[in-house]
Image (spheres, helix red, strand yellow):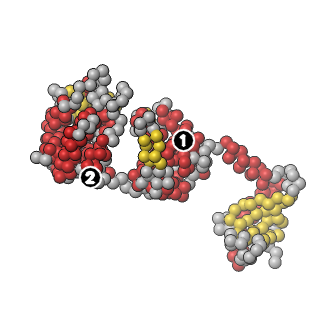
Amino acid sequence: MSGLTKRRIDAAGPEQGREVVLWDDDPKGFGCRIRESGVKSFFVFYISPVTGKKTRYSMGRYGQLTLIEARDEARKVLGAVAKGRDPAREKKLAREKFHATACTMAEFCEDYLRDAKSGIVTYRGKPKKTSTLEIDEGRIRRHIVPLLGSKLVVDLTGKDVRRFMHDVRLGKTAVIEKTKPRGLARVTGGEGAARRTVGLLGSIMSYAVRQGIRSDNPCREVERSPDGAGDRILSTEEYNRLGDALGKLETDGANPVAIAAIRVLALSGCRKGEVFSLRRDAVDYDQQELRFTDTKTGQQVRPIGRSVLKALEMLPAQEGTPWLFSAARGDGHLTDVKLFQRAVKLAELDGVSLHVLRHSFASTALELEYSELTIAGLLGHRSHSITIRYSHHVDRALVAAADRVSALIAKRMEGS
């Protein structure tokens, strides 16, 4: 039978132990091969004018290409051969050159971190904070590079990202490693780690798009599980258990600075980075406010209740440091409070992180029937930051609100 037709290709099937080839008669050398798996693909056969060898140029699968499209492509290939070119060799050399110059995920992650540290990569138009970059670097080194480092940036697919997220969730990158002389990092994976790391991977891929390395972001195809952190809040009884646990730890000789930091977080609704890096001159005891120069939403003045001031006044004297919550070792401030996990365990609280204290503060304010705008002001949300940013002092109504919310939380932690 001469000539290729759609009916002939559709009717042909695979044969065990050999490849079936259907030839066309116009142009000569054009055909369709059928593998044992049943996959049908078009090709064109010619003698290379460059090497003098028999050469097969593959064009694509039947179904992805129609017979008419494949036949037209075959004529173009044979036309190039007639002019002394070897399209198959050119295609191979182009592929080899591309793979030789294309960067891997590991290499591009290094570029991303370098540009982020120099301020080229920004978050909401501002350079990323040092603490954020440290977290990003940890996630890249512990999750992204081990699982995706050898893959080319241009080759990363949505399927790869989904598999990556699944592997992190199941703890495939779990490890316990030494960090500082007396520190350990416990990388356990889990739902939250997978969600946040894929979020970072999406930012890296967005940067690859801006750099012209890719035309799309494969992470946009992947549905991440919703962040459930905002659903967890402390009840009155749980506040009491947390307060009792902190009191017991304090009696047992635990670090009073860390305990004070936890109390301030609970009573103020501030972010942990804002509290840990508080300078002594950032607290205005008369106006009941904190003055931040570098927060997630920019420079701010934040209202605080008298219960917060009371907790600050109970801090032990610390000479020669500008920080309210100085680290136990070195000249810096607190960066993490491992004591909190001890308190949570002692209080038998499940699913409670330091950020839950912030959500619980907002929930308490809502319970006291404050508006969303007032709560935004208490928490320093972006929606309220423009008003506060250009004010010398916070509105006294916000201070009064902060007083009521922090006082109620303090009473609950004390069990009264």
Residue at left 16%, top 36%? Answer: 307
Looking at the picture, how far across and down is residue 150, in whole percent? 60, 48
Q: Residue furthest front?
A: 252
Closer to the camera, 140 or 71? Answer: 140
Q: In the picture provided, is 19 more to the left or to the right than 285?
A: right
Q: Is residue 221 visible?
A: no
Closer to the camera, 293 or 252? Answer: 252
Residue at left 46%, top 57%? Answer: 170
Looking at the picture, how far across and down is residue 175, in whole percent? 47, 48
Query: At numbered mark 1, what does the secondary structure look like: helix, strand or loop?
Result: helix
**Total numbered badges shown on the rendered structure:** 2
Q: Residue furthest top?
A: 320
| Mark seen at residue 349 | 2
Q: Is residue 160 visible?
A: yes
Q: In the rendered view of the protein, which quadrant contains the N terminus?
A: bottom right
Q: In the picture provided, is 193 more to the left or to the right than 9?
A: left
Looking at the picture, how far across and down is residue 18, in whole percent? 77, 73
Whether 19 is drawn above or below 241: the answer is: below
Whether 286 is drawn above or below 148: the answer is: above
Looking at the rendering, which quadrant does residue 132 occupy? top left
> What residue is pinned by disc 1?
109
Give the CA distance from mark 1 to mark 2: 37 Å
Disc 1 versus disc 2: nearer the observer: 2
Q: Which residue type does callout 1 highlight?
A: Cys
Characterize the local packing of mark 2: few (<14), some (14-19) or many (20 or more) Cα atoms within 10 angstroms. Answer: some
Q: Residue furthest left?
A: 416
Q: Which residue type does callout 2 highlight?
A: Leu
